[in-house]
Amino acid sequence: MQVWLPLALLLSLGVTHSLGQNAVGELPVPRGLMLQADLPAQTLFLTWESDSSLFDIEIFHTELMNVVLNETVAVQSNPATGQHGWSWHSPLPLECTSHSVLIRARNQQSVSQWSPLQTIPGSDIPEKSGPQMFPQDKLVAVGSNMTFCCIVGERQDFSKILYKGQEMSATRLSRRTYAITVTNQPPSGNTGTNVVCSSQMQILTGAVVFVGYPPGDEGLVCENRDLASAECSWKKGRDTHLRKKLSRTNYTLNGRDCLEANEGKIFRCNWTMWEGNWTLVARNPLGTVQLTDFARLTDRVHLLAPVNVTAVDIKAWNATLQWSWSIAAYKKLNMICQLQLIGHEHVITRNYSGMGLSFVVLEGLWPDIEYTVSVRCGSLHSFWKWGDESTPYRIHTKMDRPESLDVWIWMDSENTGHVLWKPLSVSESHGALDEYEVSYSKAEEDRWTTVSRPREDFSYPITLNNSGDITVAVAARNPAGLSQPSTVTAPVYRTDSQLSVSELLGTDGGFDVSWQLDANASRGYVVEWVPSGCSGLCPVHWEKVPESNGSIRVQSVSLEAGVRYTISVYVLSAGAPVLLQRWHGYTQEMIPSQSVGDLSANQLGSDVLLSWKAIAMEQQRGFIRGYTIYLANAASLELIGNVSNPEVKSYRVRGLSLGSYKFIVKAYTSAGEDTGSTVAIKLEMDTDMLVVGILVSLGAMFCCLILISIFCYKKREWVKKAFYPEIPGPKVPGDWSSPQGPLDVKPSPHSLVHIVESPEWDFRKKGLVPVPEEEEESENENVEVDTDSDEPALLRYYNQVVGDRSHSNHVSDSSGSSTTSVGSTQTEITYTGIQSPTSSQVTNGAGGYRPQMQSAAGPAEPQLGFDPDFQEESMNMGYKPQCSWQLDFPDAENFSGSLGSPTSVTSSQFLIPESSEEKPQPSNTWFHNLLSGKS
C-alpha cells in the first residue's frame, strides 16, 4: 500500500500537468512513451511518437520524487518508423533505485500536456528484499568519477560505505538505498579496488571495481634473421593495471593474432613471410593503439651469431681464427665482421669484411698472452645493426725474447751508486722471466764482469774508484732467450751545495718540468725524481725524454702529497750523463706535521729571546715560509711577530713588564700553520744585571776618584794655594803659661759699664744674660775653679733674646745684687765709652763690666774703690775670659797687655792657645798631607 501511494501522487501530477496544458495550448501529448534500460552502460533509452520536434523531459528518482533531470531537447523523428528516440546516461547505476520519466511537446508559443508517467523499477523494490551493491566488477579508466550504491535488506540498518578501506560520505536515495561518489580514482591493484557496505554489526555487501589505463605500446620495428621471414618487435607502454584475463591487451599484426606477444618488456611477433608493410593493433576494454612500420628485406638484415669459432694457427705475434654459419644464405651475403680481443687489461677491436666471411688472421698480438675473442657480423650494404655475438673463444700466444730494459744509475755518493731497471710488464716480458744479467766494465779494464740477479731484484750496487767511469749493461732472460742489453754510464755525483737548486711547486698531483735544450743531448734526457733526504736504497724513479723535447709532465702514483722530491735533469750523450738542472718540490704542500723543536725562552732585562730548532725535512711537508709568534692570553692568541725568513730561528719580544707569559711559535707553509710549540716564562727582577750595574758604577766612581787624586797630586801646589792657604800662627805678648782656669774679671778703673734701666724692652733684641757658672760645668770640665778664693764670684754673659714674660719676675729691691739677673729684661748693658780712672763711677746696685781693652793711661795702677756691699754682691757676677786673667796681678804691664785681646764675650772657650809659647799647628790629615806632599 505504501509503495503505490507515490505512484498515485505521480498520476495526479500528470493530470495536473494535462489540465495546465489544456489551458495553455492545443499541442498534442506525445504518444507511446516507452523506456528501455542498458544496465551495464547505465543508460536509459526513451522512444515516443509525436509531430513535434522539441520536447521537455523530466526524470525522477521515483520513491522520493527527486528530480535528477529537467531538460529541453530537440529530437527529430525516424523517417522509417516515425518515432522519436533519445538516451540518457545516468551517473548512478539504474539498479540502485526506480526511475520515472515525463515528456511533453513544445513549440515557440505553447506546450502540450505531460505524457503519462513511465517508470523503470530498480532493485530496491519490495520484491527484492536482500542486500545488494552496484555496480559489480566495473572496469573504468584512471581518473574517472564513479557512484556506488548499497541497497540494504528489509529490516536492516545502514552504517557506512568503505572505498579502499576509507569511509566515504553517503547520500540516501530511497528507503533502502544509500550512495557514495568517488572522484579521480587511482589505478587499482592486481585484484581491483574493494567497495564495502556494512551495518553497525557486520558487512552487508560489497563490490569490486577495476581502474586502469588503455594500451600504451610504441616503437614497432620489423626485421629478418634468415633473409626470408619477419620478426616484429615493439616496446610495451605503461602498465595498464588490468589483470583480469578478459581485460588484458590483445595484439594483432596485419590482422593476425599475436599469441606469443606478452613476454617481458619487449614484445615480439614472428611471421613466415616478409610483407614490407606492417600494422600492429593493441586493444583492451579501455582503449586501442595502432602502430605501423615499412621496410625492404635487405634493409633490415639482423644476422645470427657465428658458430664453431676456433683458432687453427697460433704464433707469438699472430693467430688464424675461423667460424661457420647456421644459415646457408649468409654465404652469398656481403658482410662485415667485428672481432673483439680482450687480453691482459687491453681491449682490441678490429673489423674485417668479405662475401660470406668465415675466417680472419689476427695480427699484432703479444707473446705469451691469453686472449678472449668474440665475433659478430652484419650486412655490409644498407647496414642495419650488428648481429648476435658468438660465444667467447680463448687463445694463448707463444713466448718470445723479452724487450730491452729501461736502465739507470743513481749515485748516492761520490764512489757508490745503484744500477736500477724497471720491471717488464707481461706484454713486454714475452713470457715468464727467469733472471737478469748485469755486466759492468771499468775504464781501466778491457773486460766485462757479468753477474746474475733473480727476477725479483731490480737493482745492483756498484762502487767506483778514482781511475775512471763505469759502464753497466743489463739484460732480461726468459725461456725464449735473452733480451738486448741496455747500457748506461754512471753519472758524476753532485750535491745540492754544488748546484743552484730551485723550488718547484706541483699541480694536480704532479710536476711540470721544463729546461733549456742542450746541444750535447744526442741521446735525449733523463728526468729523475727521488724523495729528498732519503738514505740507503731509495725509491728512485726516472723517465727518458727525446732530445727534441724540453719539458715533461711528471705524473706517477708514487708521488705523495707533503713529500719533498729532488728532481734532476741529465743530458744523455755518448759519455757519462751530465747533470743539467735540479729542483726541490712538492706535488702538494701541506701544513707541517710537527712543530718547531727545542723552543726556549730567555730573559734579557725586559725582553724575552725566543729560540728554536728547525723542523726535520720529513715533517715539514712543504716549504717553510716563516714562523709566526703568538702571545697566549686567557681566551685567544695574539699575533706579536712574524719571522718571514725561514733561516732565522729566533725572535726577541721587547718591552715586557714583570709577570708570567706563554708564547707559541708556529711554522707555516703555503698550506697553513702547524699546531705550534709552547713555552712559558716568568719575568723577574734581573738581580745579576743590578749587581753588574752597581759594580760598574762603583768602578767608574773609583776610577774618577783615582783620576781626580792624580790630577790633584800633579797640581798640589796650586790646589794648596787656592783651597788651603797657610794661616799664620797668632803672636800674643805676655805670659800665657799659667794654668787654665776661669778668667777673673775685676772692675777696671779705665772703663765702666752703665746699667740702663729700660721699662720698654724690645724682646727681639739680644741681651747679655748672666748665667751661673754651675750651668756651664759640662762645657768647662777641664777648667779648675778656685773655690777658696776671696775674689768675688764670676759671671759669664751670653747673648740671647729675652721675652717680656720675665720682666716683672726678675725685678729685685736688694742692694744691687745681680743674682736674679738671669733672663732679666729690665737691665740693658751698654758701653758708655772708655773713661779715665778718675772719672769712673760705679752706679749703685749695678755690676761692673770689664772689657778686654788696653788702658790708654799706661801702666798706672788702677785706683778703684770697692764698696764692701758691692764686693759681696759681685760674688756671683763676673766675666770669665778664656784664660786665667788676674786683675790684681802685681805687674800692671801684664794687665794692660791683656786688654784688647780677641776674646768673645759670648763664648766660654779660649780662641787663643793656653800658652803664649805654643803655636797653632795645621791638622795632619791625609788630604792635607796629600796637598802638602808629605808622606
Image (cartoon, rainbow, N blue to C red):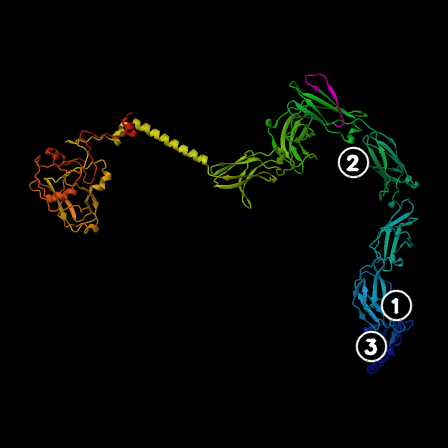
Which of marks 3 and 2 precedes in the sequence? Answer: 3
Q: Amino acid at mark 3?
A: Asn
Instruction: Tell which residue pokes out farthest to the front in this image.
Output: 788
Q: Residue at x 77, y 30 (%)?
A: 428
Nearest to the observer: residue 329 or residue 704: 704
Q: Viewed as shown, does residue 479 lie left or right of 618?
A: right
Residue 451 among magenta residues: yes
Mark 1 or 3, closer to the camera: 1
As displayed, is residue 154 above or below residue 482?
Answer: below
Residue 885, image x, y percentages: 15, 35
Residue 192, image x, y percentages: 84, 60
**What residue is disc 2 on?**
345
In the image, which residues are magenta?
441-456
Q: Quadrant of the N terminus?
A: bottom right
Determine crowd level at label 3: few under 14, some 14-19, many 20+ residues with C-alpha closer than 10 A. few
Q: Viewed as shown, does residue 171 lie left or right of 919?
A: right
**What residue is disc 3 on?**
107
Element on which disc 3 rests: loop
Q: Viewed as shown, does residue 611 lie left or right of 93?
A: left
Mark 2 or 3, closer to the camera: 2
As displayed, is residue 514 above or below residue 253?
Answer: above
Q: Amino acid at mark 2?
A: Glu
Element on which disc 1 rests: loop
Residue 329, image x, y percentages: 92, 41
Element on which disc 2 rests: loop
> What is the spatial separation of the Cα atoms under label 1 and label 2, in whole angstroms?
72 Å
> What is the spatial separation of the Cα atoms under label 2 and label 3, in whole angstroms?
93 Å
Check contact, mark 2 vs mark 3: CB within 8 A.
no
Which of marks 2 and 1 precedes in the sequence? Answer: 1
Q: Amino acid at mark 1?
A: Leu
Picture disc at residue 39 = 1
